[in-house]
Image (spheres, rainbow, N blue to C red):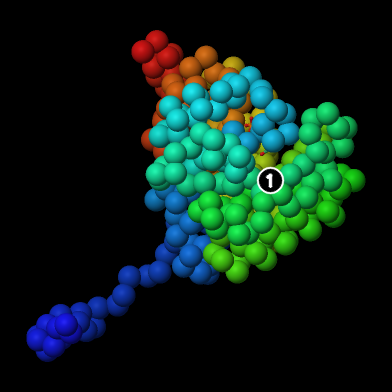
Amino acid sequence: MADKEGNIIAKDYGIGIKPPAQTFHVKGMGHAEWGMKTRLSQIFAADGRTIMLAFDHGYIMGSTAGLERLDLVIPQLMKYADCLMATRGALRACVPPDCRKAIALRCTADNSVLKDDMSHGVIGVGIEDAIRMNASCMAVQCFVGADGELGSLNNLVRTVDAGERYGIPVLGVVAVGKEMERTTRYFALATRLLSELGAHIIKTYYCENFEQITAACPVPIVIAGGKKVPELDALQMAYRAISEGAAGVDMGRNVLQAESPVAMLKAIRMVIHEGAKPEEAYKAYQLMKED
Ligand code: R5P
């Protein structure tokens, strides 16, 4: 029944008090619409940062070191990440549907590592499945400068179009083929290009003069982990990246192939969200891995 009395006695309208300024903690997304923002807020914590755990690489590499048993590994790691980056197959297989973590759904299907040129990917997951799987964002791999550049950019813009219709952001992944350079110039070009085409978040590799790349990219950048390196090196890379303007990490092998993946993810959390220096986080890692 309508509350007529409550309406009559309502009196605290705060006349003269300005509403709080509308701010949003995700770079470049102040003008995005509500649905888009609520999903970005699942990915990025209030400090504007994120820890994405990437375990999507089985889609090109098959079962790799650290990912032999998704069902054993992922459940124990997921609580320490902000966002899980995976294929729909892996999600269904090993992430319980009551998981409240953000989901970055891998939406391209690319050639496997058995092929020399992996740049000719296609859209592998449609918008309907992204909605069904409650994706917080859709990840599309792009090969700027490779043979399949235009096709991969077509995958990106088609996915951005679909995402804009339903309020689902797109994570543009800068892929580097075997023959391609890993220079500041290249990453600056590729990250900016993907953002101009509408990607809401960019994943790229860390490189020299990284602050130039984050400065010129109008949306948040998360760094890829890449091949396994010693744990301290990975923590130092994460620290340098966020000090130079990155919004977080999207790491796979450097967590999954660490001696203790759980301790490694906790140490990364210390660097990304708790202001720890890499050496301090590494010390903590060594203690935690003994537990
Ligand atoms: C692209 O994003 C790839 O699938 C990555 O290789 C995957 O996410 C694994 O990440 P990482 O390179 O950190 O092992």
User: Can you say whether 258 is above or below 205 in the image?
Assistant: above
Position of residue 52 measured from the top left corner of the image (x, y, whole percent): 53, 39
**In this view of the protein, can residue 103 be seen by the observer?**
yes
The structure residue drawn at horizontal position 83% and vertical position 28%, both measured from the top left corner, is 114
User: Can you say whether 112 is above or below 187 in the image?
Assistant: above
Position of residue 92 measured from the top left corner of the image (x, y, whole percent): 54, 40
| View extreme (top): residue | 290
The structure residue drawn at horizontal position 87% and vertical position 37%, both measured from the top left corner, is 117
Screen quadrant of the N terminus: bottom left
Give the class, few, some or many, for how many residues have Cα within 10 Å of label 1's Cα (few <14, many ≥20): many
Quarter of the image where one finds residue 96: top left
Q: Is mark 1 within 8 Å of ligand 1?
A: yes
User: Can you say whether 189 is above or below 282 in the image?
Assistant: below
The residue identified by callout 1 is 173
Position of residue 219 measured from the top left corner of the image (x, y, whole percent): 59, 55
The structure residue drawn at horizontal position 58% and vertical position 54%, both measured from the top left corner, is 130
In what quadrant does ligand 1 lie?
A: top right
Position of residue 80 measured from the top left corner of the image (x, y, whole percent): 42, 33
Q: Secondary structure at mark 1?
A: strand
**In this view of the protein, can residue 199 be seen by the observer?**
no
